[in-house]
Image (cartoon, grey):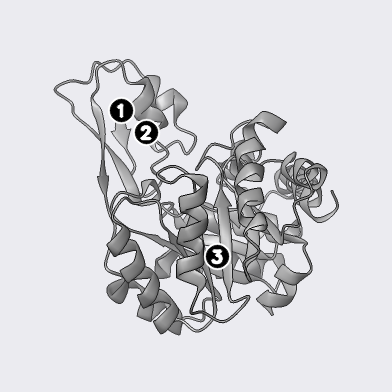
Amino acid sequence: MLKDLLESGKCFKLVCGAGNQDSVEVEKLTALYAKAGCRFFDLNASKEVINAAKRGLEYAGVNDAYLCVSVGIKGDPHVNKAVIDYEKCISCGQCDEICPQKAIVYHKVKKNRCIGCGRCLKVCPKGAISYISEAKELSEILPPLIKMGIDCVEFHADGKDHNEIIQNWEYIKSNFKGIVSICTSRGHLSDTELVEFLKKITSDIEPYRTIVQADGFPMSGGQDDFKTTLQAVATAEIVQNANLPVYIMLSGGTNSKTAELAKMCGINFNGIAIGSYARKIVSKYVSREDFLTNEKVFNEALELARKLVLSVLEP
């Protein structure tokens, strides 16, 4: 059971990207990291992506893994997609170069790959890039996915509309009976407000049915150093000190240093979710068309993936 994995304190969750609708990439990533020892996968909330992950698990010969779908509300970056204003665009190529998902190619956005990280917006010299939210009604997207046998639903609560956050959280925990996850950061909240928020949403749910994914700095894990992962550890400490009956998972800027730093700081985490960094270190292999058929290529990537997974399982 997923509870057993979380209670072991040795849970590595691969984040394929809440906005990542590239089913081909998801299949490859799932196959690779399942082989490397990962047993928990965070996915875009769509049938195509879930089926792709299942194919990846089948390729890896793994039948004891758990699938989580991520959903968000308007204002949450995880459900945003980049849009380019071509009247302002000067074709400088900076957005192409900085995109970690290779979602912008020749100044064209591949929406199925865009994860809303915001890097392209920050480097655009002409302000030609903006974002649109593709948040959907949970009553529309969740029921068919629940029927597919998902193991967890994660709700990204980084929007500013508090009432909408509470309303959607109530819908999830009432309509899905498995483990639920709330992903939140200190972006719009003080430390005290974050604790009060978590106390409120967990006050009427069974103990240890909730994962609090302490998102230090969302989608920022491109580097592998202690500074990059510091905020994830600091956010997890705030949650730990609140003494709530929840599982704690670190995310946002996570990398191979996260478990080590968390241990040094006395954080008793249940798991670590790694996305940007986990995808980055194997991207040159996964992008190859022959990735799942070229044993040499796959095994080179597998060596990197295993090292990262072990940094969490055996820090």
**SS for dot 1:** loop
**Three-letter amino acid code of the residue under disc 3:** Ala
**Which quarter of the figure has residue 230?**
top right
According to the picture, the residue beneath numbered tag 1 turns out to be 107
Look at the image and tell me whether residue 225 can be seen: no
In the rendered view, does 219 fall on the left or right side of 274? left
CA distance for labels 1 and 3:
29 Å
**SS for dot 3:** helix
Image quadrant in which the N terminus is located: bottom right
**Three-letter amino acid code of the residue under disc 2:** Ile
Would you place residue 182 above or below residue 29 in this image?
A: below
Residue situated in front as seen by the camera: 228 or 97: 228
Would you place residue 34 above or below residue 191 in this image?
A: below
CA distance for labels 3 and 2:
24 Å
According to the picture, the residue beneath numbered tag 2 turns out to be 104
In the rendered view, does 112 fall on the left or right side of 163? right
According to the picture, the residue beneath numbered tag 3 turns out to be 53
For image coordinates 43% across by 46% down, the residue present is 189
**Which quarter of the figure has residue 270?**
bottom right
For image coordinates 37% across by 25% down, the residue present is 122
Label 1 environment density (alpha carbons within 10 Å; few <14, some 14–19, many ≥20): some
Q: Residue furthest right?
A: 314
Look at the image and tell me whether residue 133 can be seen: yes
